[in-house]
Image (cartoon, helix red, strand yellow):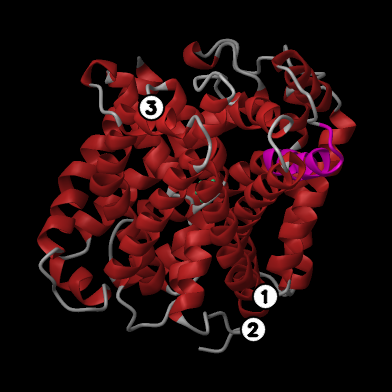
Amino acid sequence: MTTSYAPRHWTSRFAFLMAAIGSAVGLGNVWRFPYLAGENGGGAFILIYALTTLAIALPILISEIMLGRMGRQSPINAMRALIAEHKTLRLWVLIGWGGTIGAFIVLSYYSVIGGWALKYIELALTGAFAGETNEIAAGQFSAFVENPYDLWIWQTLFLVLTVFIVAAGVTSGIERAVVLLMPLLFVLLAGMALYATTMPGFGDAMEFMFAFNLAKVKPDTVLAAIGQGFFSVSVSLGAMMTYGAYLDKEASIGRAAVMIAVADTMVALLAGIAIFPLVFTYGLEPSSGPGLTFITLPIAFGTIGNGILIGAVFFLLLSVAAVTSAISLLEPIVAWLEEGVKLSRKWLAPIVGAVAWVAGIGTVLSFNWWADFHPMAHFGVMEEMTIFDVLDFTTSNIIMPTVGLLMSLFAGWVLSGKVVAEALGDGVKAWFPLWRFALRYLAPLGVVSIFVANVLM
Ligand code: PHE
């Protein structure tokens, strides 16, 4: 097949793994996971998170990469190709559309939070955290988010970085960036975690993270863990599907997906190991919610020796994690346009970036001018939400579960066992029946339960 765009493929399996792990490891691991674990009682949440990720998110991840590699195009066109090949309902193209639209929405707000991470590198380096108390740190954070111009500048910078990498191409942009940035991220994180082991609060932190207390497990904990698993391993937004489309035909998808999920979980745990000892050493609150990273941690950075360096390293790590995820949100959209219009990605990436930038205005203003604007005031659960909350809620609780459900049904029920066994690339292994069982029964059940509990209750 001749295409009007440059060939898109990874030059090695290592490159694919780094790109996919780069997508999975993001704000979800370093910002969201520790605060969710903190709010949901630590150990109980972490154990349930690990189990549900294995039983639900991982099987769907395997099918997402597989569908991408079978279709070998952007999610929308890959699904069209698969529908034609297997003569099935046009409705399944919703997998492609839902994922691509979801990716766009997430990109629009993810870039705003990514901008916060960049801003905090600056704050750390200029010594702004020195001698902070809880009030000062909270004041510093609200002064920043209450200024829309500041948020815009940092969001713009974040998007420019993302666009630049995607515009340069799959091999010379994305691949080159991730093979450099991901090992850097691991080194920074390992360094932070090692340093944390020397802190007086390390013991309490480990107790908090790993002591399993059954009394702390509530239905909400399970649902929060399932939802976090989805977001964290990047399933359902077409990112993994697109990366799968660039993967060579022989690579074992099962093995790759296990590596991605394990690396993602390890990074989340290491982030907890890096963060909680600081929290406990300085007698701060582990359950302080989304502000854990941006309010609680700076207090610790302002007090410890070498706090400037350690703070800057931490926010650099957070920024790297966020950029490598954002490129995987932009790529499915750019890939789809590239297949349909006669413009190269050098133009398409900035155009999509600009549209996401404009769409991000709603998120930027959610923290200041429009903080009291509730667009869904008449829709039950969304009544009190700002635009940012609505976008986050609809993508994580509606679009992602729906696409995940459709994907598990398509790969589990529409495609025959023989077809999928062949598509996975390493013959039928012992885990194959387990995977198929998880895909056909566990995943749909798990997804429907998050949906019912979060949206309808
Ligand atoms: N997994 C990313 C994170 O943890 C977010 C993401 C979700 C990226 C879906 C791409 C697709 O931050």
Residue 327 placement (x, y as % from top left): 63, 59
Residue 73 placement (x, y as % from top left): 49, 71
Q: Residues within 10 Å of mark 1 (few under 14, many from 20)?
A: many
- Label 1, on which residue? 169
Contact? badges 2 and 1 (CB < 8 Å): yes
SS under mark 2: loop
Instruction: Name which residue lies at 52% across and 57% down.
Output: 23
- What label sits on residue 208 in the rendered view? 3
SS under mark 3: helix
Q: Looking at the rendering, which quadrant does residue 433 occupy? A: bottom left
Instruction: Name which residue lies at 65% across and 28% down.
Output: 388
First of labels 2, 3 by sequence position: 2
The range drawn in magenta is 113-128
Instruction: Name which residue lies at 32% across and 34% down.
Output: 210
Is the residue indicated by label 3 positioned so its CB lies within 8 Å of ligand 1?
A: no
Up the image or down, 351 lies above or below 143; here it is below
Is any atom of residue 360 visible in this view? yes
What whole-number distance in Å separates the C-alpha atoms at marks 2 and 3?
A: 50 Å
Left or right: residue 443 versus residue 375 is left
Q: Check residue 120 for magenta coloring.
A: yes
What whole-number distance in Å separates the C-alpha atoms at marks 1 and 3?
A: 44 Å
Is the residue indicated by label 1 positioned so its CB lies within 8 Å of ligand 1?
A: no
